[in-house]
Amino acid sequence: MRLTRERERIRSEATQIKRLTTRRLPIFSHIPAVLLDRFTDAVHQFDAEPVFRYSQRLSLLKLAGRLGIRRFDANLIIASIERERGLPQPQVANSRWAGAVAWSVVGLLQAMMIAGVWWTVST
């Protein structure tokens, strides 16, 4: 129970910091702070993945339209939050096996080319 309260407190503090960061950007100065806060809260609710699915992005753009936020500004806000979250790091193949697999593919291709030349010459 205590851990849950602590997580909620940290999450609310992080949301406040993100709101202030978004408000300070001069490009969003024409958007009222209340509307900007409401939209950024909606964007932060989708915290399962670092990059939004197309359907999520469309629903956020519809919300922005209802709030009077231009589509361009909404896309900038969404992109800045996606950038904050960072992209997942790609899985790198085990380097010990990566070289062996690459050389095996090269060897297989060479063998197929030699077999093809042999078949063409022998017939």
Image (tube, rainbow, N blue to C red):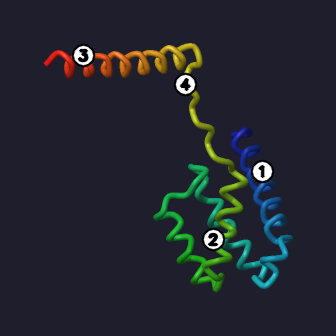
The kind of residue tagged 4 is Ala
Give SS at disc 1. Answer: helix
Distance in Å between CA atoms under marks 3 and 4? 35 Å
The image shows residue 86, relative to residue 95, as above or below, that is: below
- Give the structural element (helix, strand or loop) at label 2: helix
Mark found first going from the N terminus, 4 or 2 = 2
Residue 103 percent location from the top left of the image: 48, 16
Q: Tell me which amino acid carries mark 1.
A: Arg
Q: Which residue is mark 1?
A: 9
Toward which corner of the image does residue 29 lie, by quadrant?
A: bottom right
How far is disc 1 from disc 3 in space, using C-alphas? 73 Å
Mark 2: amino acid: Asn
Q: Which residue is mark 2?
A: 75
According to the picture, the residue beneath numbered tag 3 turns out to be 118
Q: Residues within 10 Å of mark 4 (few under 14, many from 20)?
A: few
Residue 122 at what x, y percent from top left?
17, 15
Q: Earlier in the sequence, mark 1 or mark 3?
A: 1
- Real-space CA distance between mark 2 and mark 1, rounded to the nearest whole angstrom: 28 Å
